[in-house]
């Protein structure tokens, strides 16, 4: 074997050894921080906990938490959770679910509705039934719109009073994980002080109905007053507002064209009874009734006499 070939083989082996040592060094440097990270603990429920359940050393446990980032409001030890006194569950917690400050009372507090209200907000209870309460499908934690219906003489109106209102309780239930609908007689919602005044006043001048919103759908919608006159304007459910407006414009243009054609061919009967004062050389053919919403008009249609 030539000396050049031997040297090439030795150089290749040397390069391979260097590459292997470099790779091992990189792997160790990357795995070292993970191994060096101290493993913390977090407090979780040892069993399912319902609303009002007191937290004790028997129904909570500490479990390892590999990440250095602890969830907001979580506790790292049972002693830290229980050190200041009795705490009670405000919203149901499942087994092995972290215990968070937002889901339990403060030290020594009772499990009451007042503990669920956000700072600066108020709770107002509204009377509902199987229709105004969305057939019982509204549950604690849902978001609803509140619609006021009232009558002024022969006119009736419906106004969207408040949007995206949080439901705190249905009857005496505050369980957000309640399964299945239940027809309720009262619904408690969370609003500001001024909004509470509006709701109390509205309950005395008309009837309030709940409109259930899509989960997570918090976008405000421009709402206008709806009256009985709007009932004559049919709409296609699911069509966006721009297409609805375009369709309405086309229908209005079509109605205007029909009115113009009818005026050209017909004489309103209010001017004279049918058959009287009819145009010269014309004979009455038939009566046409046009209904627009709640308004009805009759026309005498003539044709050229033979």
Image (cartoon, rainbow, N blue to C red):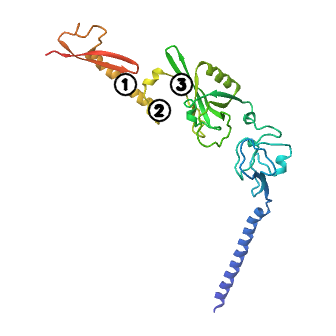
Identify which residue is drawn at 64% across, 20% down: 201
Q: Which mark, by number, is residue 224? A: 3
> For the point 31% across and 19% down, which residue is it?
289
N-term mark: 2 or 3: 3
- Near mark 3 (Cα within 10 A), the count class, few <14, some 14-19 or many ≥20, is few
> Which is nearer the eye, 182 or 82?
182
The residue carrying mark 2 is 242
Q: Position of residue 33 (x, y in %)?
A: 77, 62
Residue at the disc numbered 1: 253
Q: Residue 51, percent across and down?
A: 72, 42
Kindly report the distance in space between the C-alpha atoms of the residues bearing marks 2 and 1: 17 Å
Identify the image quadrant of the C terminus: top left
**Picture residue at 25% right of the left edge, 10% below the top:** 274
How far, Cα to Cα, is label 2 from label 3? Answer: 16 Å
Residue 166 occupies quadrant:
top right
Q: Position of residue 152 (x, y in %)?
A: 53, 15
């Amino acid at each position: 074997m030539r000396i050049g070939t031997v040297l090439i083989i030795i150089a290749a082996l040397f390069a391979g050894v260097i590459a292997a040592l470099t790779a091992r060094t990189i792997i160790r440097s990357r795995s070292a921080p993970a191994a060096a990270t101290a493993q913390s603990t977090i407090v979780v429920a040892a069993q399912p906990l319902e609303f009002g359940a007191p937290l004790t050393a028997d129904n909570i446990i500490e479990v390892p938490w590999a990440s250095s980032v602890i969830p907001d409001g979580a506790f790292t030890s049972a002693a830290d959770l229980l050190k200041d006194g009795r705490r009670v569950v405000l919203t149901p917690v499942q087994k092995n679910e972290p215990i968070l400050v937002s889901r339990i009372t403060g030290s020594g507090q009772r499990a009451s509705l007042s503990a669920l209200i956000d700072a600066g907000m108020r709770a107002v209870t509204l009377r509902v039934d199987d229709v105004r309460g969305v057939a019982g499908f509204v549950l604690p934690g849902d978001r609803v719109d509140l619609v006021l219906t009232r009558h002024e003489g022969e006119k009736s109106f419906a106004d969207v009073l408040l949007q995206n209102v949080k439901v705190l309780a249905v009857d005496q239930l505050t369980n957000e994980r309640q399964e299945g609908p239940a027809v309720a007689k009262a619904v408690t919602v969370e609003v500001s002080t001024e909004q509470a005044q509006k709701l109390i006043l509205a309950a005395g001048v008309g009837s309030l109905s709940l409109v259930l919103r899509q989960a997570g759908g918090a976008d405000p919608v421009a709402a206008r007053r709806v009256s009985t006159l709007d009932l004559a304007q049919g709409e296609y459910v699911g069509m966006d507002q721009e297409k609805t407006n375009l369709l309405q414009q086309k229908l209005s243009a079509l109605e205007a064209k029909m009115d113009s054609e009818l005026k050209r061919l017909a004489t309103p009967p209010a001017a004279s009874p049918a058959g009287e004062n009819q145009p010269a050389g014309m004979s009455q053919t038939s009566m046409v009734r046009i209904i627009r919403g709640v308004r009805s008009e009759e026309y005498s249609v003539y044709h050229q006499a033979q």
